[in-house]
Amino acid sequence: GEDVEQSLFLSVREGDSSVINCTYTDSSSTYLYWYKQEPGAGLQLLTYIFSNMDMKQDQRLTVLLNKKDKHLSLRIADTQTGDSAIYFCAESIKGTDKLIFGTGTRLQVFP
Amino acid sequence: DAGITQSPRHKVTETGTPVTLRCHQTENHRYMYWYRQDPGHGLRLIHYSYGVKDTDKGEVSDGYSVSRSKTEDFLLTLESATSSQTSVYFCAISGDQDVGVMEFEKLFFGSGTQLSVL
């Protein structure tokens, strides 16, 4: 079935790099996404990667995709306190109009 | 929040009562979605709409119904609320019809409705 898994928590020191991992199940996904949710707010699209790419870099964010292992990761360089949030990965399901979201990883950044 | 308004923002109700949550958009997006967010489960799709009067079920649709009589509004109804439906409900939209590019996977979310069923 459709299942997207993430670890629930990650704690890092300010200035260090954060790596948030995700495994997905649908090998036919067209795009894979990372969304960010700040406290008390809805989700916002952070970045996405097309399934025929293996890496995408956008300023402090690096997305790595391993299609063979169905593994997606988000690396945040020089993590700041403002990066503290819940991060969701999501996969599109081919032939449908919907996304399947992971359970979310709560990133806590401490000074 | 990209022209998306959810109402109410907070609601407390009793088991067995009907509840309707409203999502209103000013963006002329084709797709609208209702998700619920629960600890340990992330976001789960309840129902979605791909046009006026066109709706489909998501992964957790039991106990919920939806209606979309016009592009701007997508209503989620709990016919008889249960305590298991206590959750945060998010509306999302995608598919900007003015642009003409069916980027239906880039979702924009509302601020959420906290529903407590006692």
Image (cartoon, rainbow, N blue to C red):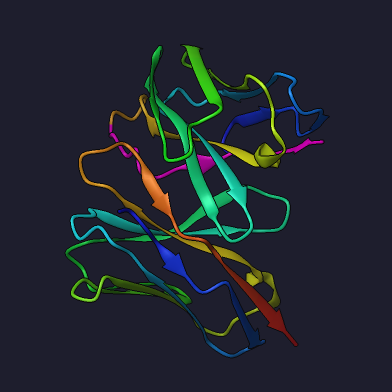
Picture residue at 68% right of the left edge, 49% below the top: A41
**Residue B58: image location, x then y, percent:** 41, 36
Along the line of sight, which residue is nearer the eye, A22 or A13? A22
Picture residue at 45% right of the left edge, 43% below the top: B107
Q: Is residue B11 left or right of residue B39?
A: right
Tell me, yes or no, whether the highlighted magenta stretch contains residue B103. Answer: yes
Picture residue at 69% right of the left edge, 27% below the top: B81
Q: In this view, does A89 lie above or below B31?
A: below
Which quarter of the figure has residue A65? bottom left
Which quarter of the figure has residue B114? top right
Q: Can residue B77 be seen in this view?
A: yes
Along the line of sight, which residue is nearer the eye, A102 or B51? A102
Main SS of the magenta part reads loop
Which quarter of the figure has residue A24? bottom left
Tell me, yes or no, whether the highlighted magenta stretch contains residue B35. Answer: no
Q: Give the range drawn in magenta.
A: B101-118
Q: In this view, does B79 lie to the left or right of A76?
A: right
**Residue A103: image location, x then y, percent:** 51, 61
**Residue A76: image location, x then y, percent:** 50, 78
